[in-house]
Image (cartoon, rainbow, N blue to C red):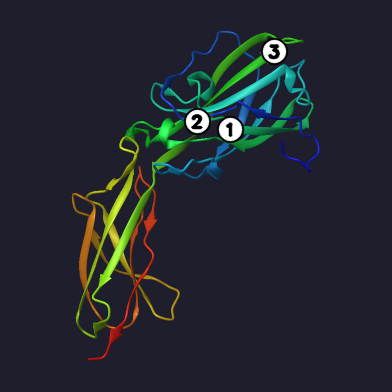
Amino acid sequence: MKTGRPGTVAAIAGAAVALSTVTAPAAQAASTGITVSRVVVNGGKSVIVGTTDEKEPSLTFRVTLPSGYTSADMSGWSTWPFLYHGTTAAEGAESGGLRTGIYTCYPTTPRIADCEGNLYIDPRYDLDSNNDATTWKIGVRTQLWKPGGGLRTEQVVTASGTVKVKRWAKVTVNASPEPVAKGKTITVTGSLKRADWVKHTYTGYADKTVSLQFRKKGSSVYSTVKTATSSGTGALKTTVKASVDGYWRWSFGGSSTSGTATAAGDFVDVRER
């Protein structure tokens, strides 16, 4: 639990939300009367996921309670945010064995609490299709509890807003020969790859426009020199004329399903003939 802030009521373990392909639970007819609003995931930015690294995007939301319940006593109510797309859901509590995110709620009025925490995504278990690189909706399961325990009623609702989940991309570069005589040809190669959530590795990203950029020695600014299109295997290749010492790199601006990627600069020493 976080400390140092007044009014903290609880840190909820089990409010979790790893992604999966479990059928979304149907909302029960009875309404809990709980309203969940101001939901923001990852600061409103896309969530970029690789093949092995776990991601914990931030989560903030506001809970407004019905009459008879207080934001200072979470024994009477609970909320379970999750992500889903299409006809599938991503609620860890339903799938079993999925990782749990944690959030903490802070009462702002007797019936309103502002909550913050994180979701948890492990691509090795929670993403099993490359079609998961899409726009996800935000769902929330709300629950009211009887005094002394026992579920009174629950409801599953869709909150406003969406989240884009994208595949992590990476690009490499090699400029040669090194050194090179001024005026001679430099061949710049590399590869563009992105996460494959089925194979759990990085595979070539074909037919994408990638920028070749150059930074002169002593400068901190890269400029685009030309563009190239990745091959069917994601390979990159082009040529330029050597003029001054500097760094060459490939830079990919991303796509609707994949994140951006920029290689570290490869230095080429250009010498007078």
Label 3 sits on a secondary structure element that is: strand
Mark 1 — residue? 101
The amino acid beneath tag 2 is: Ala
| Image quarter of residue 119 | top right
From the image, state whether disc 2 or disc 3 is nearer to you: 2
Q: For the point 36% across and 31% down, which residue is it?
A: 128
Residue 118's tag is none
Closer to us: 52 or 75: 52
Rendered location of residue 52, percent (x, y)? 42, 42
Q: Marks 2/3: CA distance? A: 24 Å
Q: Earlier in the sequence, mark 1 or mark 2?
A: 2
Say above or below: 88 vs 170.
Answer: above
In the drawing, does residue 185 fall left or right of residue 90?
A: left
- Asked whether disc 1 touches disc 2, contact meaning CB atoms under 8 Å apart, the reply is yes
Label 2 sits on a secondary structure element that is: loop
The amino acid beneath tag 1 is: Gly
- Asked whether disc 3 touches disc 1, contact meaning CB atoms under 8 Å apart, the reply is no
Residue 18's tag is 2
Q: For the point 20% across and 66% down, which residue is it?
A: 238
Q: Marks 3/1: CA distance? A: 21 Å
Closer to us: 152 or 2: 2
Q: Earlier in the sequence, mark 2 or mark 3?
A: 2
Q: Earlier in the sequence, mark 3 or mark 1?
A: 1
Rendered location of residue 138, percent (x, y)? 51, 29
| Image quarter of residue 136 | top left
Label 1 sits on a secondary structure element that is: loop
Mark 3 — residue? 145
